């Protein structure tokens, strides 16, 4: 009973500190939260929480603020991630459903995530090594010119024009299309490349082999790997009081996408799975020990092919941020799933 009451006091301190940006005193807790106990009991609970390292007193005679340990307990004890409101869900769906291609999906995701959370949003481009071939189309543009269209499960579309040495007959083109689709569709990139090579061995000067070469080149094109889009840096202006400890290092990190990719971590598991929260010193960089990162994976068919999330000072609305990160990831996954 005592533990649950102290957890309620800690929860109230976190919520008030995030909302007011001011250290929280026992009188304010009693007035604002129906804790059902006397101010003296609340003071005793706060003293116990401070002794255990969950809250701290930044200045003499000031109220208390949560420590990283306090935020961690608060996040770990969240029974559920609070649901997004109907208006928020509609806003996400309306904004993302208007995307025209993968670049637009990523760009819109960053914008809506930064607006919902009022933090710096990060979206990693889908990783090619985990994507599969959804469809390949060969379109004759002219007797000796062919358009090769490659569509991956990540939503990425590649188009290449192949100039042929001679005209491909309808029969040859139909046979090539059948062999390509049979070898590649549904396979991960590495397997598709191997099976295409086996189905159409490379032959110098052969037009059919040249088409397959172009298709393989499109598959292994690394332009999308290790790419990340960032948005919402202006939101850091809200944290002027912690500029040197949190904002300045974060602004410097935004310039280094390798750092942000490491903050996002490896995309593993299910895209519909849980949200990861790393608080303060739990992250990989000591200079970012005053920031927190909230991430999750996204991808088609419940397979995480990339990560998205937010990064910001530890004083953040964790329940709301976790809900927004999860919701945006689910919508993006659905869009990729539907192609």
Image: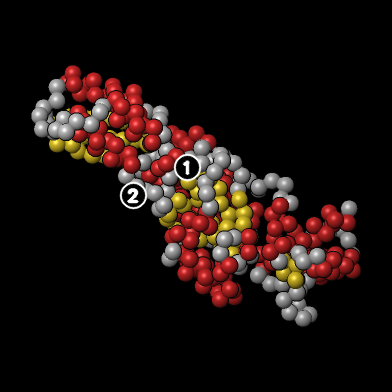
Residue drawn at (23%, 20%) of the image: 175
Residue drawn at (43%, 66%) of the image: 255
Residue drawn at (38%, 36%) of the image: 189
Give the quadrant of the C terminus.
Answer: top left
Query: Crowding at label 2, few (<14), some or many (≥20) Cα neighbours within 10 Å?
Result: few
Q: Give residue 77's position: percent from left, percent from top.
A: 74, 51
Circle 1 residue = 305
User: What SS does tag 1 mark?
Assistant: loop
Quarter assignment of residue 8: bottom right
- Say if 187 sits above or below 100 in the image: above
Viewer-proximal residue among 199 and 325: 199
Q: Give residue 216's position: percent from left, percent from top.
A: 29, 37
On the picture, is 171 further left or further right than 29? left
Extreme residue in the bottom direction = 60
On the picture, is 217 further left or further right than 86? left
Circle 2 residue = 223
State the CA–CA distance, disc 2 to disc 1. Answer: 16 Å
Extreme residue in the top direction = 171
Query: Crowding at label 1, few (<14), some or many (≥20) Cα neighbours within 10 Å?
Result: many
Viewer-proximal residue among 140 and 37: 140
- Say if 77 sits above or below 255 in the image: above
What kind of colouring is applied to the model shown? secondary structure
Quarter assignment of residue 60: bottom right
User: What SS does tag 2 mark?
Assistant: loop
């Amino acid at each position: 009973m005592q533990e649950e009451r102290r957890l309620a006091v800690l929860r109230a301190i976190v919520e008030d500190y995030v909302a007011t940006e001011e250290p929280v005193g026992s009188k304010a807790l009693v007035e604002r939260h129906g804790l059902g106990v006397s101010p003296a009991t609340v003071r005793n609970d706060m003293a116990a929480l401070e002794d255990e390292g969950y809250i701290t007193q930044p200045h003499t005679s000031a109220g208390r603020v949560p420590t990283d340990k306090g935020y961690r307990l608060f996040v770990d004890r969240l029974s559920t991630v609070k649901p997004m409101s109907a208006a928020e869900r509609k806003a996400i769906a309306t904004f993302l459903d208007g995307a025209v291609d993968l670049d637009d999906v990523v760009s819109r995701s960053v914008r809506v995530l930064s607006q919902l959370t009022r933090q710096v949003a990060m979206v990693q481009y889908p990783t090619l090594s985990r994507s599969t071939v959804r469809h390949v189309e060969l379109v004759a543009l002219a007797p000796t010119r062919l358009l090769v269209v490659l569509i991956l499960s990540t939503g990425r579309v590649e188009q290449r024009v192949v100039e042929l040495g001679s005209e491909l007959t309808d029969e040859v083109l139909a046979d090539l299309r059948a062999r390509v689709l049979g070898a590649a569709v549904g396979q991960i990139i590495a397997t598709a490349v191997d099976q295409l090579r086996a189905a159409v061995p490379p032959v110098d000067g052969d037009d059919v082999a040249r088409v397959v070469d172009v298709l393989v080149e499109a598959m292994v094109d690394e332009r999308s790997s290790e790419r990340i889009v960032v948005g919402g840096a202006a939101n850091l202006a809200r944290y002027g009081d912690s500029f040197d400890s949190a904002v300045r290092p974060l602004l410097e990190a935004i310039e280094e996408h390798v750092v942000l990719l490491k903050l996002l971590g490896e995309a593993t598991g299910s895209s519909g799975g849980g949200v990861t929260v790393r608080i303060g010193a739990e992250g990989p960089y000591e200079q970012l020990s005053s920031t927190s990162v909230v991430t999750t994976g996204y991808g088609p068919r419940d397979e995480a092919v990339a990560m998205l999330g937010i990064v910001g000072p530890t004083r953040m609305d964790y329940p709301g941020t976790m809900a927004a990160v999860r919701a945006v990831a689910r919508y993006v996954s659905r869009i990729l799933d539907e192609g």
